[in-house]
Amino acid sequence: MKIVLAQPRGFCAGVVRAIEIVERALEKYGPPVYVRHEIVHNRHVVESLKAKGARFIEELREAPPGALTIFSAHGVSRKVEDEARLMALPTIDATCPLVTKVHNESRRYVAQGRILVVIGHAGHPEIEGTLGQIEGKAHLVQNEQDVDGLAIAPDAPVAYVTQTTLSVDDTRGVIAALNRRFSDIQGPETRNICYATQHRQTAVRELARVADVIVVVGARNSSNSTRLREIGEQAGLPSYLVADGGEIDPQWFRGVNVVGVTAGASAPEVLVDDVVEALKRIAPSDVSVLDGPEESVSFRLPAELAL
Ligand code: SF4
């Protein structure tokens, strides 16, 4: 059996920054440091930060008075920011700068008097944050049918933004439907899709050309990991999402010559290694890496944590 790894795969710059923020806050201020929501959607990452003294909470009221609290990479609504101010909690914002860019664009459109349509997954923390960053109501659409159901006049001034973890392909149909439905519509000049999402999705398509089976390393609640698995499936290959090597089922690889392995943006490389080792226990395997772009993106840390 051959194992082929996608390039790029795994951690993106936003995830690296968010984890570094928690680690540096722990070093600088000492444990415990409170983190609202999973800092990134990966249990391994969360557990290793817990071991260093991070405490994960879902609501700010779970933090004791005055406790340093970090907002996760997915971003938060204004309501959460206001709540932190009211509680006088010192906070550090680990929102990915690409998500912050979407918040800024959303506010700019609303300030121009446009009705905002947000393309994304209902209930995802990034979407809750984006919807909660603007004054008044924004409309969430998840697919082309939702566009038909929008209670907005066809000639009303409308603008759209998209969840960062949807690719150009994911949003193409919805954006086309919006353009058909509304005569005065604007969207961001370059789509809100982040470079990491686009690169990982392109890489899994390349992987599907050479593999018989696709294994995606990532958490079930990770939107971008789930999407990578779906792309493998759409390419016609059996595709599995696993948290680590312990979830590998030898039955999946009967008669398989080439296993393609990739990882979502919140999955650390140590879990890819774990999956590769599990595959090697099923059959002795050569490991190679597919050609793909090297990423050099990095984001600055918040000023209080910069060296
Ligand atoms: Fe930021 Fe993209 Fe990573 Fe999300 S996937 S944290 S938007 S770099």
Image (cartoon, rainbow, N blue to C red):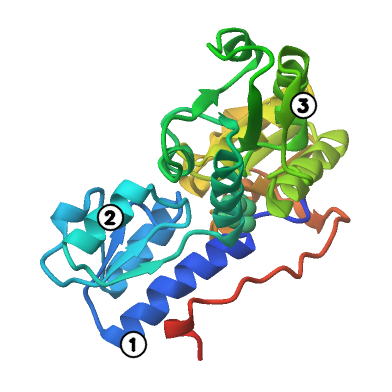
The residue identified by callout 3 is: 172
> Picture quarter containing residue 72?
bottom left
Quarter of the image for residue 144 reads top right
Query: Which type of secondary structure does the marked residue at label 1 adopt?
Result: helix
Query: Mark 3 is on which residue type?
Result: Arg
Residue at the image point whose x is 44% and y is 73% from the top: 21
Q: Earlier in the sequence, mark 3 or mark 1?
A: 1
The answer to whether residue 21 is left or right of residue 35 is right
Q: Does label 3 point to a residue whose CB lies under 8 Å from ligand 1?
A: no
Work out whether 184 lies above or below 80. Answer: above
* The one of 129 and 34 positioned closer to us in this rendering: 129
At label 2, counting other C-alpha atoms closer than 10 Å, the crowd grade (few under 14, some 14-19, many 20 or more) is few
Q: Which residue is mark 2?
A: 82
Q: Which mark is residue 28?
A: 1
State the image coordinates of residue 265 (x, y, percent, origin top left): 60, 52
Residue 192 image point, x, y percent: 68, 45
